[in-house]
Amino acid sequence: MKKILILGSTGSIGVNALDVIRKFPDRFKVVGLTVNSKIDALEKQIKEFQPEFVVVTDETKAKELKSNIAGLCKVFSGYNELLESVTQMDYDILVGAMVGFAGLAPTLEAIKRGKRIALANKETLVVAGEIVTKLVLEHSAQIIPVDSEHSAIYQCLIGENLNEVEKLILTASGGPFLNKDKSFFETATIDEALNHPNWKMGSKITIDSATMMNKGLEVIEAKWLFGLPVEKINIVIHPQSIIHSMVQFVDGSIKAQLGLPDMKLPIQYALTFPERLKNDFERTNLPAINNFTFFEPDFDKFECLKLAYNVIRTGGITPCILNAANEIAVDKFLKGKIKFSQIPCLIDKALNHIENHFEPDIETIFECDKITREFVLDAVV
Ligand code: NDP
Ligand code: MG
C-alpha cells in the first residue's frame, strides 16, 4: 500500500490523480491533500478519501474549512505549513500537481527526503532543472513525469541506451489557434484562448497551449529529465494528440507511445511504475481516429516558442525569467488587462531588462522569480 500526498488536489491533474487512486483502493492510500483556496471541493475529497491532513494555503479559507469539517482530519494553513507538511509528514509518493513556480519549493523538499515524485509541475524543471536533477541523484529520489509527452518518452526509453538516441520528438496539438493567422492574436478573446480542442486542463496551461509556450516549457523539461541537448529535442505538430511523443534512435527506428488525450494514463503510470496495472479506462480506437497528420511548428507565428528556444540556448537564469514573466503575462491576459498578442512582448521585455546570471544557486532563482514578477506587473506593453 503506497501512501500518497497530492499537492494541488482540486486542480485538473489533482482530480485526475484521485480518479486513478479511486480505482485501486488496495494499492494506494491518500494521506494528504493540499489546495490554494477551493475548500468546497476539498471538503468532498476529505469525506471520500479520509486523508490524515490537508493544507489550505489561503489562511482565511483554512479557518473556514476547519470549522466546517469539525476534526475529520488535521488542517494546516499557509505556504510555510505546506512546506512543513512535505518535509515532515509520512508519505511514499508526492503528486506534484500545483501550478507554477509555487510548486518548486515543496518539490525540492520531497527530493531531499528521497521520495518518488509523480511530477506534473513542469515549471519546477524549467526554472531549476540543473539543481533539481543534481539533488535527485544526491538523495536517490525519483522523478517520474506526468506530462503526457514526457511520460511517452520515458516509456519509449525503457530498455534503451541514451547514447543511441538520435532525437526526441515532442508532439504538440498546436492548440486552439493552430489554423489562425498571426493577426488574429490581436483580437483573440479569453474564451477563444481557453477553448482547447483536445485537452481539458487548468487555465494557465491552457493559455500556454494557445501561445505554444507550453511546448517551449516542455522542451526545457525534456532537456533536464532525459539529459539531452536541445539540438536533439524536436517538436512536431500532431493535431489529433494520440501519439503523445516519440524517440528516434541512431538506426532510424522511431518508437512512439499512443493513447487517448486523457491524463489518467500518464498519472497511473507514474504511480505504478515499473508495473502496469489493468484498468477500465476507455481504449484508443484507431480506425475511428482514421488519420494522423504531422507538420512543422510555425516559430514566427508562435513567438513564445522562439523565446523558449532562445533561453535554452542562453541558459543561466533566463529560463526562470521566461517562466515568471509568462506566469504574470498569462494572469494579466486572463484578467483582461492585456491582449493575447502582448504575452510574448512582455516576456521579451523582461528577458531584455533583467540581467542574466550563470550557474545560479537556488537563492538566486527565488530572487530572480521575485524581481521578474515585480517588473512584469509594473510593465506597460
Ligand atoms: P489547475 O489550475 O487546474 O490546478 C492547480 C492546483 O494547484 C489547484 O489545486 C490549486 O488550488 C493549487 N494551487 C494553485 N496555486 C497554488 C499556490 N500558490 N499554493 C498552493 N496551491 C496552489 O492546474 P493543472 O492541474 O492544469 O496543472 C497543474 C500542473 O500540471 C501545472 O504545472 C501544469 O503545467 C501541469 N500539467 C497539467 C496538465 C493538465 O492536463 N492539466 C498536463 C500536463 C502538465 P485551488 O483549486 O484551491 O486554486
Ligand atoms: Mg504536455
Image (spheres, rainbow, N blue to C red):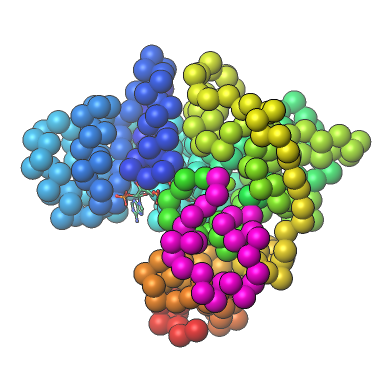
Along the horizontal axis of the image, is 368 left or right of 344?
A: left
In the image, farthest residue toward the bottom: 380
Q: Is residue 364 visible?
A: no
Residue 165 in the image: state x and y as whole percent.
Answer: 81, 40
Q: Is residue 14 above or below residue 334?
A: above
Q: Quadrant of residue 110?
A: top left
Quadrant of res 18: top left
Q: Nearer the viewer, residue 184 or 264?
A: 184
Q: Residue lying farthest right? A: 251
Count up the numbered dots: 0
Q: Quadrant of residue 66?
A: top left
Task: Report whether 371 appears left or right of 53.
Answer: right
Quick one: 158 or 258, which is closer to the camera? Answer: 258
Q: Is residue 196 magenta?
A: yes
From the viewer's side, name the closer residue of 89 and 229: 229
Up/down of 181 relative to 130, above or below: below
Residue occupying the point 51% across, 74% down: 187
Q: Residue at x 12, y 48 (%)?
A: 64
Q: Residue at x 40, y 25 (%)?
A: 21
The magenta segment:
174-198
How far across and down, in percent of the image, does residue 243 sit? 68, 38
Image vertical order of residue 179 relative to residue 107, above or below: below
User: Residue 162, how many percent across, how many down?
Assistant: 78, 38
What is the magenta segment's predominant secondary structure? loop
Q: Is residue 184 visible?
A: yes
What percent of the width, then of the height, locates residue 340?
Answer: 51, 71
Name the residue nearer the viewer: 31 or 170.
Answer: 170
Kindly identify the residue that appears in the image at 41 percent across and 18 percent down: 24
Q: Is residue 379 above or below residue 250?
A: below
For the N terminus, give its image quadrant.
top left
Q: Is residue 183 magenta?
A: yes
